[in-house]
Image: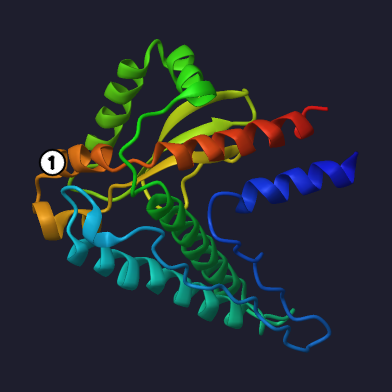
Amino acid sequence: MQATRRDALLALAVGGAALLSGPGNAAEGGKPQPASKHPVVPLPFDPKKLKGLSERLIVSHHDNNYAGAVKNLIKVEEELARVNKDTPGFIVGGLRERELTFTNSAILHELYFGNLGGTNKPTGALQKAISDGFGGFGRWEELFRATAMSLAGGSGWTILDYNFHTGDLRTYWAGNHTQSLAAGYPLLVMDMYEHAYQMDYGAAAAKYVDAFFDNIHWEQVGQRFDRAQRAAALLHR
């Protein structure tokens, strides 16, 4: 049973985003261990075809902010591979904080780009779960938009999570890359850092929120929900 649960947790960590390897290993016996490598995942859609989000904005976001996080994660892991028993704690702590920041940034950006490029509406089990969990789909959208706007002019993420601790869907606010639900699997991710919209909309974050909703790939969100349900069934056996 323990092996099955570990497999389920691994699936949670990688399903829906690109397959990111685990954190780099610390040096053992004074010998540096090789750091894991992470690919920069290409955009899963044609950036020319989004509504209200320019190709220039999307490509810059992907090639600079997301790819930069991946490249920095690799550099941090290379430094962590050199850590040994004599490394000062403040250096280890700083590297671990950066490791978490860049890991979450890479994962959340991949999920964000992955849930763009569609125009369809949620259907089936996902639509029912959202409606049942929030008192109607319209009520969920109202709350999701309000959460996003609470971050306007600042930095952070708005995330619809499958909460494995409670077994339901919740919308969460994340002020930065290190604030995320410990037992959550992101179904829908919205980047509310200003780099996600300033080039197109300046400070008009509400217009970006409208454009985001016009481009949600609900089929992809539904596939994530299906994976989360399967994983939850394994975890609660």
Q: Determine whether 66 is above or below 78 in the image.
A: above
The residue indicated by pointer 1 is: 207
Give percent across and percent down for residue 133: 48, 16
Residue 77 appears at what percent x and percent y?
59, 76
Q: Point out the residue furthest to the bottom here.
A: 31
Q: Nearer the viewer, residue 163 or 227?
A: 227
Residue 58's x, y, as percent? 26, 61
Residue beneath the point at 65% across and 76% down: 36
Q: Residue at x 47, y 62 (%)?
A: 106
Image quarter for residue 218? top left
Tell me the quarter of the image containing the C terminus: top right
89 or 111: which is nearer to us? Answer: 111
Whether residue 38 is situated above or below residue 13 in the rendered picture: below
Q: Quadrant of the N terminus?
A: top right
Are there few (<14), some (14-19), or many (20+) residues within 10 Å of tag 1?
A: some
Q: Is residue 58 left or right of residue 87?
A: left
Is 201 situated above or below 86?
above
